[in-house]
Image: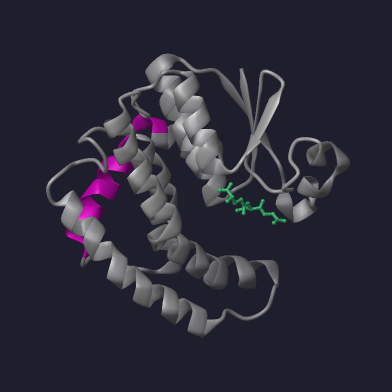
């Protein structure tokens, strides 16, 4: 049994999308434990024993704990021998490539905008930094065409099949709605996003939070 500790954040969503997809694919059993960051539940002594980083998500499995959402996603899929993270080295490298692309490029800029426009004002942490938002939008418009072109020829990000790359990317791209970043000019990304939203396991994750 896996135990995932998390909050309403895209890093937790990544891990939940993967765990719910594994539950569907291989019957993986897991429990989700909500950690309320707004109440400082991640600063308690008990939570500190789970992770030195003091952040969510954290996975607990067979006496081992793990932080960093991408490491969690890879560990659970690998442990379950899931096709979401293929054993074949070349195919796995393709999944890794798109996971890294998202975490370091469009995901990074979408997270920045989400923080500036939604989290900061919502938490009373001061005004949004417009220069930071503008810079992030500029970088997004450099990187999203790469993705749109790729998705013109394939339904899924890697190996033409659903993988960890799609499930983790979803958690970044779904921020476009709340931050008011239109995907209208990126028709292939929008079609991929619609396909992702139609997955039953995605609906199950969203129903949890
Ligand atoms: N790179 C980490 C990021 C984790 C992270 O930043 N978690 C945030 C929520 S999105 C958190 O726990 N923040 C609490 C804090 O920093 O006090 C991952 O992918 O898991």
Q: In percent of the image, x 62 and y 42: which residue is there?
A: 57
Residue at the spot x=79%, y=52% of the render?
40
Taking 7 as reference, is 155 left or right? left
Q: Where is residue 180, by image quadrant?
A: bottom left
* Percent coordinates x, y for residue 169 in the rendering: 38, 48
Q: Main secondary structure of the magenta part?
A: helix
Residue depicted at 47% across the width and 77% down the height: 133
Indicate how the structure is coloured in the image: one colour
Quadrant location of the N terminus in the rendered image: top right
Question: 102 or 193, which is in the foreground?
Answer: 102
* Residue 30 drawn above or below residue 190: above
Locate the C terminus by quadrant. Answer: top right
Give x and y (percent) for residue 100. 41, 50
**172 within the magenta span:** no
In the image, residue 7 lies at what x, y percent? 63, 45
Magenta region, residue range: 186-201
User: Going by the picture, which residue comes out furthest to the bottom?
Assistant: 131
* Residue 193 on the magenta span: yes
Relative to 151, residue 96 above or below: above
């Amino acid at each position: 049994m896996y135990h995932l500790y998390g909050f309403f954040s895209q890093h937790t969503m990544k891990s939940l999308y993967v765990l719910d997809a594994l539950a569907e694919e291989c019957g993986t059993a897991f429990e989700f434990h909500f950690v309320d960051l707004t109440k400082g539940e991640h600063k308690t002594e008990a939570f500190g024993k789970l992770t030195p980083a003091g952040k969510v998500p954290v996975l607990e499995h067979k006496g081992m704990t793990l932080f960093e959402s991408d490491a969690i996603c890879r560990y659970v899929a690998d442990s379950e021998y899931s096709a979401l993270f293929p054993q074949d080295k070349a195919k796995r490298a393709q999944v890794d490539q798109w996971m890294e692309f998202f975490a370091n490029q469009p995901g990074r800029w979408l997270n920045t905008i989400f923080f500036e426009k939604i989290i900061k004002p919502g938490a009373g942490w001061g005004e949004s930094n417009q220069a930071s938002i503008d810079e992030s939008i500029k970088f997004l418009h450099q990187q999203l065409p790469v993705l749109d072109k790729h998705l013109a020829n394939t339904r899924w990000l890697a190996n033409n099949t659903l993988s960890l790359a799609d499930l983790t990317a979803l958690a970044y791209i779904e921020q476009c709605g709340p931050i008011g970043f239109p995907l209208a000019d990126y028709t292939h990304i929008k079609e991929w996003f619609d396909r992702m939203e139609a997955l039953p396991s995605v609906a199950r994750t969203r129903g949890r939070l």
